[in-house]
Image (spheres, rainbow, N blue to C red):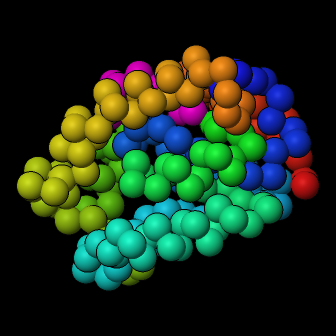
């Protein structure tokens, strides 16, 4: 997939990055600039009480979204990348350093545990979210290398959608003006 600096024509955009990189925020900002409908994937994968949606149902929901002509997705889980990547016209790869995404994740998780702000389908962040068996922080460490490897492989591949390779938040800021109403 060729690395690009011109996202101006894409109407199907996948935001991809490690846990804590700011995918949802980036997706909402890009959708607001372009008028493209945004889907926050956590809304499709977690029911109230942090009960996971069955994988076959997730796959069905994502296939339905990916089949449309216009969308912004804030991530793609490995179980259904095959549905999203071939339809994407642009992948925005948030390839930030571990220290940056980790400090962002820790700050966000702490603040959400304190203020109990609802985040998806009425769920809230618990203190267990910091240290428990299913901790989002543990998930960051478990998935970081795999996600970074996937980003690099996409950027190096000959075929597939173009990749907008973002190494720093200021790179994303400088690209935002390129996203215009579609």
Q: Is residue 29 left or right of residue 97?
A: right
Position of residue 51 in the picture relative to residue 95 (left or right) = left
For the question of whether residue 43 can be seen, the reply is no
Give the answer, above or below, for where 154 lies relative to 128. above
* In the image, residue 62 above or below residue 101: below
Residue 73, by quadrant, is bottom right
Q: Is residue 134 magenta?
A: no
Percent position of residue 133, x then y: 9, 55
* Direction from residue 166 to residue 43 in the image, left or right: left
Towards the viewer: 59 or 119: 59
| Residue at 81 percent of width and 45 percent of height | 10
The number of numbered discs placed on residues in the rendered structure image is 0
The magenta region covers 93-102
Q: Quick one: 65 or 174, which is closer to the camera?
A: 65
Give the x, y percent position of residue 160: 67, 33
Q: Position of residue 92 (x, y in %)?
A: 63, 37
Above/below status of 3 relative to 101: above
């Amino acid at each position: 997939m060729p690395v690009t600096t011109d996202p101006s024509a894409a109407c199907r955009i996948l935001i991809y990055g490690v846990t804590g990189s700011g995918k949802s925020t980036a997706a909402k900002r890009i959708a607001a600039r372009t008028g493209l409908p945004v889907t926050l994937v956590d809304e499709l994968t977690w029911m109230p009480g942090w009960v996971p949606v069955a994988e076959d149902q997730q796959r069905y929901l994502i296939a339905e979204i990916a089949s449309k002509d216009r969308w912004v997705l804030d991530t793609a889980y490995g179980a259904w990348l095959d549905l999203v990547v071939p339809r994407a016209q642009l992948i925005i790869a948030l390839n930030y350093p571990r220290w940056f995404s980790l400090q962002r994740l820790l700050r966000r998780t702490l603040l959400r545990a304190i203020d109990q702000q609802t985040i998806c389908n009425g769920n809230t962040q618990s203190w267990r979210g910091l240290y428990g068996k299913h901790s989002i922080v543990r998930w960051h460490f478990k998935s970081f290398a795999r996600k970074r490897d996937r980003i690099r492989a996409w950027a190096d591949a000959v075929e597939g959608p173009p990749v907008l390779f973002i190494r720093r938040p200021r790179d994303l800021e400088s690209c935002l003006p390129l996203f215009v109403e579609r």
